[in-house]
Image (cartoon, rainbow, N blue to C red):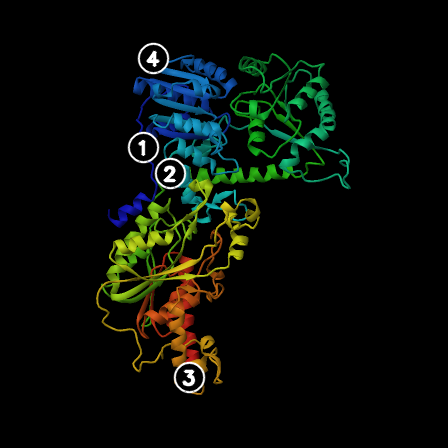
């Protein structure tokens, strides 16, 4: 495969596997028809449309067309009480829906609830629709695993929900996996980073945000009003939503000095029980003030709380829908409320906050709140949705013992709106055909002592002549550990080890071509920890071995290898790695492991080295850094006495240095590399940079250049970064060739090359 073709594969374009239609159900609005046609053409698609935008008619139209096209049945899975509403909606739109009772024959659209999934012969359906597909939310959830496996081979798939990812974009990964677009682990590697501040949390990589949502827009659409995708908003302006927060003072808890406090998830249920009586008293006051003819939804969090609410409001026509009720009773009571058969519905958000239409109700009371924005948002939208004509009043009852819960919900709402904005922007770019490959423009700064190039390291290395480089030293991206830009050419932007290996192999071919025969390429790297959430196990991936295999496959053999010691305590504090945690010594020693060192792998190109790396008089008279030179004692003691050197002779002191160099480089382990001896890098940081820039230590670069090159020779780094290798090469009297893709790093790279030349000039003056 040509390199440019390989870059196209990294764009993660989704292959359309569906079909086109000209005519759809006449009841569809123009924006709905546009979405259904895109979903049918895609074959496997997700509709993330806000409540009231007609997901039901869209999914029914899609299912009906797929059944006709395949001449086979299509299945819709929905929450329990939603199945009845969906059947009624289908009749209204002229689409016949049958409730699934047994195996089916022939074509048609069938519906059942998620609880029946274990009893369904799924391979008889050519298409599947997930109504309220946020059931896929949890990667380790029961239904996510069952649905993904059961419909792995289904040809046509549609997922529909209003809130795909209110505060967790990773949920989109479970949708992508269900739709056979990309595996969950591949999506984590490509777009997400494990937050070292919270080892159980994954977040979008800074530079991957826009690319992630552009990718999602290729297999889904998101909107909260038709205008988001270029259609008219006429008829979709919602009436006012009035949210009232009531904080009940409950007094000091037993044994506590203060009343107001922030509750955590562990204490949440206990706090609910202790404040239940005070909250119900406030709730009764609210209900008594609501007009008699109005219906009310009361959302409770605990079964006993719901029972006590019903007792306190026993003078009203009230029903309590709980999880222990039979499916028939749940469906009957929920549909009965929708039909106006009684005044007050008491239930939990997990039972009735998804998919149901309660526009007949204009009053809601949350008897208590939890930390879930999604359930709160979805619950409110049962009443406040398109089609509602009246103002909707919502009361949220909290207490002085739960002062942080509203704050957390508000923060999650901001995250949801940010996600909606990013997604809407990406969808519009997709609709307009503006999602294209990132094309990097080249840029050069060249003098007689250095050549700094901006661009893709593979393509720019192709510009260098054969057998033109004397030495190479660099540190490549460590697969998915760090990502420095959103360029598709960035080797950190990969979906996993295989894609990195394929990308890096193109560079290795060029390295062999430009490196002089008999000369060396030094690669700094480390082995990488695996994560159970992404890789399925906690262990180590031998990244150093992968690199060695790629170099050896191209005929460059391993010449030398050094281990760079790193403090495991600092690594434990920084990474919170479970294998380095001291508690594991007492808890389970099978989990403990050694800290991960750095490696320097030195590869040699076969052939004769035509210019030996040495000094003319046999002494080590190349660059001697002042901090090393000053280490040599001037008295005939210690090291000098051992070797018999004249402490006053400059040449003998240089000779002494050569013996120190030999001892240091002959050692397989470098214990004295200063991890903090790096170039200043803060000016090169971008706002979206992940973690920190990782410049290679100057100690490492210095030793390698000193050992494997002569003064005046060219040192090449294809991953130039902020210019550490080039800076050190120039300071040591060599020339530099440096390539960097990212603009901000390139700018700093050029400055550091110039600084090295200026510093050399200042030293020559003295």
Q: For the residues carrying marks 2 and 3, which lies nearer the camera in this image?
A: 3
- Rendered location of residue 230, percent (x, y): 42, 34
Q: For the residues carrying marks 4 and 2, which lies nearer the camera in this image?
A: 4
Residue identified by numbered label 4: 105
**Of callouts 2 and 3, which one flags the residue occurring earlier in the amino acid sequence?**
2
Q: Residues within 10 Å of mark 1 (few under 14, many from 20)?
A: some
The answer for how far apart the CA atoms under marks 4 and 3 are is 98 Å
Q: Regarding mark 1 in the picture, which secondary structure is present there?
A: loop
- Rendered location of residue 450, percent (x, y): 34, 69
The answer for how far apart the CA atoms under marks 4 and 1 are is 28 Å
**Of callouts 4 and 1, which one flags the residue occurring earlier in the amino acid sequence?**
1
Q: For the residues carrying marks 1 and 2, which lies nearer the camera in this image?
A: 1
Residue identified by numbered label 3: 644
Question: On the image, which quarter does residue 27 sit in?
Answer: top left
Identify which residue, 582 or 83, lies in the foreground.
582
Q: Which mark is residue 16?
A: 1
Q: Regarding mark 4 in the picture, which secondary structure is present there?
A: loop
- Rendered location of residue 679, percent (x, y): 46, 65
């Amino acid at each position: 495969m040509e390199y440019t073709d390989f870059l196209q594969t990294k764009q993660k374009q989704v292959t359309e596997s569906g079909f086109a239609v000209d005519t759809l159900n006449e009841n569809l609005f123009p924006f709905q028809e546009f979405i259904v046609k895109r979903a049918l053409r895609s074959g496997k698609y997700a509709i993330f449309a806000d409540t009231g935008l007609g997901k039901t008619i869209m999914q029914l139209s899609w299912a009906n067309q797929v059944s006709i096209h395949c001449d086979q049945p299509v299945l819709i899975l929905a929450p329990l009480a939603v199945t009845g509403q969906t059947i009624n909606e289908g009749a209204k739109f002229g689409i016949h829906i049958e409730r699934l009772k047994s195996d089916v024959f022939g074509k048609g659209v069938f519906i059942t609830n998620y609880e029946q999934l274990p009893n369904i012969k799924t391979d008889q359906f050519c298409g599947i629709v997930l109504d309220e597909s946020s059931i896929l939310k949890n990667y380790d959830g029961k239904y996510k695993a069952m649905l993904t496996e059961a419909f792995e081979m289904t040809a046509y798939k549609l997922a529909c929900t209003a809130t795909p990812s209110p505060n967790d974009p990773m949920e989109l990964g479970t949708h992508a996996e269900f739709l056979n677009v990309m595996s969950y682990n591949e999506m984590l590697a490509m777009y997400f980073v494990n937050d070292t501040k919270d080892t159980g949390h994954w977040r979008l990589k800074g530079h991957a945000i826009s690319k992630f949502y552009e990718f999602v827009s290729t297999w889904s659409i998101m909107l909260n009003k038709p205008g988001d995708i270029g259609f008219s908003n006429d008829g979709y302006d919602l009436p006012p939503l009035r949210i009232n927060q009531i904080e009940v003072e409950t007094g000091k808890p037993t044994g506590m000095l203060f009343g107001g406090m922030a509750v955590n998830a562990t204490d949440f249920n206990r706090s609910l029980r202790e404040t239940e009586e005070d909250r119900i008293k406030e709730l009764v006051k609210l209900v008594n003030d609501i007009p008699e003819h109005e219906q009310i939804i009361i959302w409770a969090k605990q079964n006993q709380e719901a029972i006590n609410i019903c007792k306190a409001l026993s003078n009203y026509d009230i029903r309590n829908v709980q999880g222990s009720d039979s499916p028939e009773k749940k469906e009957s009571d929920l549909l009965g409320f929708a039909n106006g058969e009684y005044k007050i519905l008491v239930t939990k958000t997990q039972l009735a906050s998804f998919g149901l239409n309660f526009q007949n109700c204009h009053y809601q009371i949350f008897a208590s709140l939890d930390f879930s924005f999604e359930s709160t948002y979805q619950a409110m939208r049962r009443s406040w949705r398109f089609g509602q004509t009246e103002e909707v009043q919502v009361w949220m009852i909290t207490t002085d013992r739960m002062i942080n819960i509203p704050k957390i919900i508000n923060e999650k709402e901001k995250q949801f709106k940010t996600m909606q904005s990013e997604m809407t922007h990406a969808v519009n770019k997709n609709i307009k055909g503006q999602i294209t490959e990132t094309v990097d423009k080249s840029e050069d700064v060249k003098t007689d002592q250095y050549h700094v190039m901006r661009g893709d390291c593979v393509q720019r290395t192709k510009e260098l002549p054969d057998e033109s480089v004397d030495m190479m030293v660099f540190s490549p991206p460590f697969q998915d550990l760090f990502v420095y830009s959103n360029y598709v050419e960035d080797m950190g932007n990969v979906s996993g080890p295989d894609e990195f290996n394929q990308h890096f192999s193109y560079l290795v071919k060029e390295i062999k071509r430009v490196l002089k025969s008999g000369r060396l390429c030094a690669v700094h790297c480390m082995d990488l920890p695996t994560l159970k959430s992404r890789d399925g196990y906690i262990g180590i991936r031998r990244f150093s071995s992968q690199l060695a295999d790629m170099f050896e496959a191209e005929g460059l053999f391993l010449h030398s290898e050094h281990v760079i010691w790193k403090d495991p305590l600092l690594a434990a504090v920084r990474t919170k790695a479970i294998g380095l945690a001291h508690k594991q010594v007492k808890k389970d020693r099978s989990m403990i492991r050694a800290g991960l060192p750095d490696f320097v792998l030195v590869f040699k190109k076969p052939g004769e080295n035509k210019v030996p790396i040495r000094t003319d008089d046999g002494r080590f008279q190349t660059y001697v850094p002042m901090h090393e030179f000053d280490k040599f004692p001037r008295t005939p003691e210690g090291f000098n006495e051992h070797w018999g050197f004249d402490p006053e002779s400059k040449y003998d002191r240089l000779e002494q240095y050569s013996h120190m160099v030999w001892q240091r480089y002959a050692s397989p382990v470098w214990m004295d590399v200063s991890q903090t001896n790096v170039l200043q890098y803060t000016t090169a940081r971008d706002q979206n940079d992940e973690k920190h820039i990782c410049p290679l230590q100057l100690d490492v670069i210095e030793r390698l250049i000193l050992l494997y090159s002569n003064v005046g020779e060219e040192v090449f780094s294809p991953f130039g970064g902020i210019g550490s290798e080039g800076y050190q090469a120039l300071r040591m009297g060599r020339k530099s060739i440096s390539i960097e893709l990212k603009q901000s790093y390139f700018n700093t790279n050029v400055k550091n090359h110039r600084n090295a030349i200026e510093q050399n000039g200042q030293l020559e003056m003295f």
